[in-house]
Amino acid sequence: MRKDLFSAVLSAALVLAPMGVALSAQDDLSGFTLEQLNAAIRSSGAGAQKIYSILTFDSEDRQGSNLAMLSSSRSGWHITVLHRVEGGLKVVWRSGNLPQDFNVSSSNSLKIEVVEDEQVVEFSGCAPHLCGDVNGVIGVLLYSPSSKQAFSAHYKYDDRKPLGNFGTLELSKNANEPGNERYKAALRKAMSEALRSEVP
């Protein structure tokens, strides 16, 4: 009886297996496989780097169609953004080696934030031996998939500033361009949170 039951289950599995393969062969752009992720990591140049965080997030037209990956090499942190396309994942943006502002950070610093109706990638950190809220050197990075732009903010403590002003905040040039006001506001908000106080 048990042998007959085992045979029936095995036969059903063999019949259903080809159906499963046929369904997965039809790429509906939902989710991704480990094979597709591995291919994307290799094509991004991050194959030899250590990966610390992978986050999925939405695009304007589809849920979970983007992926942000934080990796590290001897030269520092790297961020890669990929988009789900037919057949796998396509690299849409690479940060390259992030500057010293970000050297001291962690995987928890890679976040997906909402700027108005758009999900964006955010990362922050500080320079070695220069962390410590308002008394340090801090960097914030924001990547917008819809505008295909990266925005950055750099804060440096300046003891020559009047009491209460603390330091200098510099924003990337594109943050001040017309149409990018929401990203500028998001950068300032992220920096304020990193400093745990309001940036003037």
Image (tube, rainbow, N blue to C red):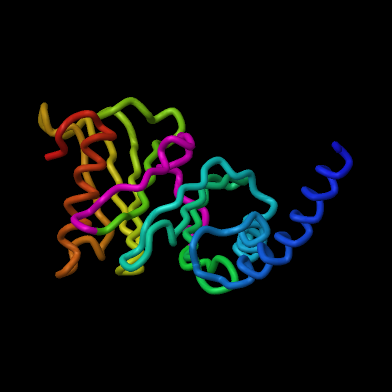
Q: In the rendered view of the protein, which quadrant contains the N terminus? A: top right
Image coords of residue 48 (percent x, y)? 69, 52
* Segment tinted magenta in the rendering: 94-117
- In percent of the image, x 75 and y 62: which residue is there? 15
Relative to 47, is 57 on the left or the right?
left
Residue 155 lies left or right of residue 184; in this view the side is right
Q: Residue furthest right?
A: 3
Q: How many marks?
A: 0
Residue in the image at 48% along x and 39% along y: 103
Q: Is residue 35 above or below residue 155?
A: below
The answer to whether residue 54 is left or right of residue 119 is right
Kindly give the residue lying farthest to the front in the view shown. 1
| Residue 108 locus on image (x, y percent) | 43, 35
Residue 42 among those drawn in magenta: no
Q: Is residue 179 above or below residue 127?
A: below
Between residue 52 and residue 32, name the one nearer to us.
32
Considering depth in this image, is 92 or 78 the residue closer to the camera? 92
Is residue 113 in view from this perspective? yes
Residue 148, image quadrant: bottom left
Quarter containing the C terminus: top left
Q: Is residue 123 above or below residue 84?
A: above
Q: Position of residue 52 (x, y in %)?
A: 56, 40
Q: Can residue 74 be seen in the rendering of this structure?
A: no
Residue that appears at 14% across and 34% down? 198
